[in-house]
Image: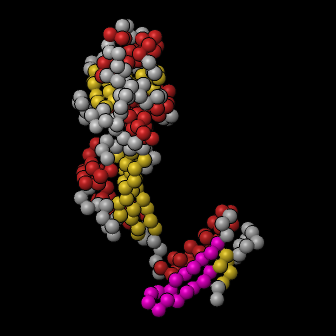
Amino acid sequence: GSTPIANEHGTAPGIFMRVERADAGACLIFALPGVPTEMRPMWEQSVAPAILAARGEARVIHHRRIKCFGVGESQLEAMLPDLIRRGREPSVGITVSDATITLRITAAGVDDAECYAAMEPTIAIIRESVATLAYGEEEDELEDVVSRLLVERGQTVAVAEWATGGLVSQALARTAAASTVFAGGVVLSSLTQLQSLLRVPDVLSLSANPNVSAVAMEAAIAVRNMAGADYGIGIAAFPPEPDRPAAHVCISITTPQRTRRLRFGSATHPAIRQARAAKQALNALRLILLSQLGDI
């Protein structure tokens, strides 16, 4: 038979049942009401202690997440020596969201210290294997890392973007140090706007095609000068056929001393095209701030 589990915050009791199995140990079955205010106290007072008693020793589980950007999931997995293997301890899971790859390391132990100690060798292998592809941990996004690097250097950035539709500016504006590091942003949708908003003279002499490197470069230089920033990011338009194998988006990052002209492949799922291009721009600035990026 079953045993009721007391519910001090409602009328529906829980149910506990122990089922003996001939070919394995006993199976413990718990059924609780779904209302969170009722379920949580019942879990803490009855279910969790029963599970711990059945296990014979207290066990805790901890996770750490390492965020990566710059290659595809299969490429990154190939860099990791047997870390994603099923049954490995600590385990390493891999997920992708809007071109950001998250590696989640999971370890179990008798206490927090044992879990974290068990994870450290795996984390060291990951960081050595992927190098600067790993940009942060836990809740870090690329804009958070860029913002911290700019704060450390006492520098600022301004953005003029076309293909990304304001996503880079939005990301930087959301960071904790936005008022300190983000000097301003301009969203473009025509060459005429490049001329009227950023005062780029004779813009049509650059090219009638808005997805060329010259457009990104002039936008970067103009927005940096307009905002008085240390860095200027310029992002040109996507090409007319962005999914062709040779298609790319042009991004330029400029300082008073140097202008970098970069190109990144634009072929990807349409749902993440803008987000990936925005992250490519932020990641390029991150690598420049770390002095790890030349011209592409």
Q: Residue furthest top?
A: 202
**Nearer-the-camera pick, 88 or 208:** 208
Residue 164 versus residue 110 in the image, above or below: above
Task: Specify start and end residues of the magenta stretch as a single range.
Answer: 16-32
Instruction: Name the image quarter holding the N terminus.
Output: bottom right
Q: Is residue 179 left or right of residue 104?
A: right
Instruction: Name the image quarter holding the C terminus.
Output: top left
Instruction: Estimate the x, y position of residue 166 in percent, counting from the top left.
Output: 47, 28
Q: Residue furthest bottom?
A: 22
Instruction: Estimate the x, y position of residue 189 in percent, counting from the top left.
Output: 46, 21
Name the residue located 71 percent from the left edge and 75 percent from the top edge.
Answer: 13
Instruction: Estimate the x, y position of residue 283 in percent, counting from the top left.
Output: 34, 36
**Total numbered badges shown on the rendered structure:** 0
Name the residue located 52 percent from the left edge and 80 percent from the top edge.
Answer: 53
Name the residue located 62 percent from the left edge and 75 percent from the top edge.
Answer: 31
Is residue 261 located in the magenta-colored stretch of the structure? Answer: no
Name the residue located 26 percent from the left edge and 20 percent from the top edge.
Answer: 258
Q: Is residue 153 left or right of residue 2?
A: left
Is residue 20 located in the magenta-colored stretch of the structure? Answer: yes
Quarter occupied by residue 249 = top left
Task: Say if residue 255 shows up in the picture.
Answer: no
